[in-house]
Image: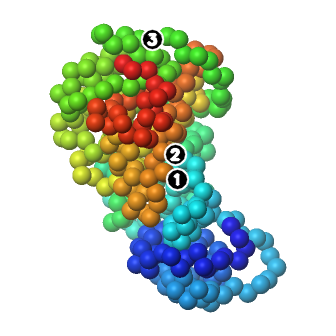
Amino acid sequence: MKEKLDFEVFKSSDMQKKKEIVRSLGIYELRGLARVLGIKSPTTKVREILIENILLTLVNGKPFDPQVSRKGRPYKKLAHIDSIVSMIANNPEAKDVSFDALASFNQEVPVFTFRDSQIITACGVLRSGKLSTYFIDLKRNFHVFIPEELVEQKGLVTGDYVEAEAYKINDSNQYFSEKLTKINGILFEEYTPKPQHRSAQVLPSEFFHAGDMKVLKGGRNVIINSEPLFLDARLKELLSNLSHDDADDIFLGLDLCFEDEIFVTSKNFISFSSQYLSSSSAGFDRIVDAINLVSRLSEQGRNVNLFIYDAGLLLSVMDQKFLSEGRTPQESATVLKKIVSLAEAREEGTTTTLIASIKQSDIENGVLKNDLIRISVRI
């Protein structure tokens, strides 16, 4: 990012689109954007004033309420602020971004206005930030915050899968948990974090059988499906046989019809799914959490089977998400590459096995052909 921003890059973008993007940002993203635009004292301004100042700056082509040059400690630029500027500028020359940048978490902060007496159970994948640690409940999509003393006590990090008891703390769908019951499938009292390690990769060579199907352990596998999951005999047989393998079974499938969702919940999977006609943002949250969990479990030396239902639909949901933010579908390919890269056989004998189902009509999808089908075993 240049120290003085070139406002010429903003002239080609539609003002209404700018307003939509700016108003969708969180307070920390707004402050970061105000800094690079040269607006004075962004940390002292409330959200609506920041939005107003930013939009006036973009319209006028010069900073509103400009910063005064002074000595002092330089501010820390947000890791994804360049991507935000590119979205607003509609800059076609913006560089590709990494999965980590695309999956940057908003700096969520719990807001306590009351304590509900009702205790509910919730589960999800931790997201650790500088200001808070929380997860998004996999069934009801609300945020559950974890006290930092528990995080430090058990060495919790982004990607840990937790089950918790929580109570509601406000009317903004936020909950708080003072009691975790399980961490990565282990009882809270018995859980001890293992040191993170990355074992050397080796060539996958072992198969497990599911009827007449052979699945390469530690490899990338694809299966063609032509029916909804709950009707597809080969998919049902494959999923049933996965449970016989000594591994953590993870299911990732978006926009599921009611019947498919019921079938998945009947299996002993950690399921990252969204219901039919859910928002693309909710679907993307499921993708990010699934990737982070698989990465975390593999770092802990666990065997993992990751089953992706309808990879073409997965791409479609991501395309909707990124296009709604003024981005390009190229970001979907970045995330898919991250998913594909999870599959590996490791030196100590553990594996992360990827199994993706694809509809016949999606076989010619350019992204799938380049990043999944080309380098996978056909089941």
Q: Residues within 10 Å of mark 3 (few under 14, many from 20)?
A: few
Number of numbered labels in the structure image: 3
Q: Residue furthest right?
A: 71
Counting from the top left corner in percent of width and height, residue 203 is at 59, 16
Q: Residues within 10 Å of mark 2 (few under 14, many from 20)?
A: some
Residue matched to label 1: 102
Q: Secondary structure at mark 1?
A: helix
Residue type at numbered disc 1:
Leu
Report the residue at 63% width, 22% height from top: 201
Label 1 and label 2: CA atoms lie apart by 9 Å
Q: Residue at (56%, 20%) from the top-left corner?
A: 345
Rendered residue at 28%/32% (across/down): 360
Which residue bears the numbered disc 2?
334
Q: Position of residue 6 (x, y in %)?
A: 65, 77
Tell me the amino acid under the disc marked 2: Thr
Compared across the picture, whether 335 is left or right of 283 comes to: right
Tell me, yes or no, whether the two marked residues, 1 and 2, touch with CB atoms within 8 Å. Answer: yes
Instruction: Give the image location of residue 347, x and y in percent.
Output: 63, 17
- In the picture, measured across the screen, residue 139 lies left or right of residue 99, that is left
Looking at this view, is 129 or 348 the one in front? 348
Q: Which residue is mark 3?
A: 207
**Which quarter of the rendered picture does the N terminus lie within?**
bottom right
Q: Residue drawn 36% across and 65% down?
A: 172
Calculate the distance from the C-alpha at mark 3 to the C-alpha at mark 1: 34 Å
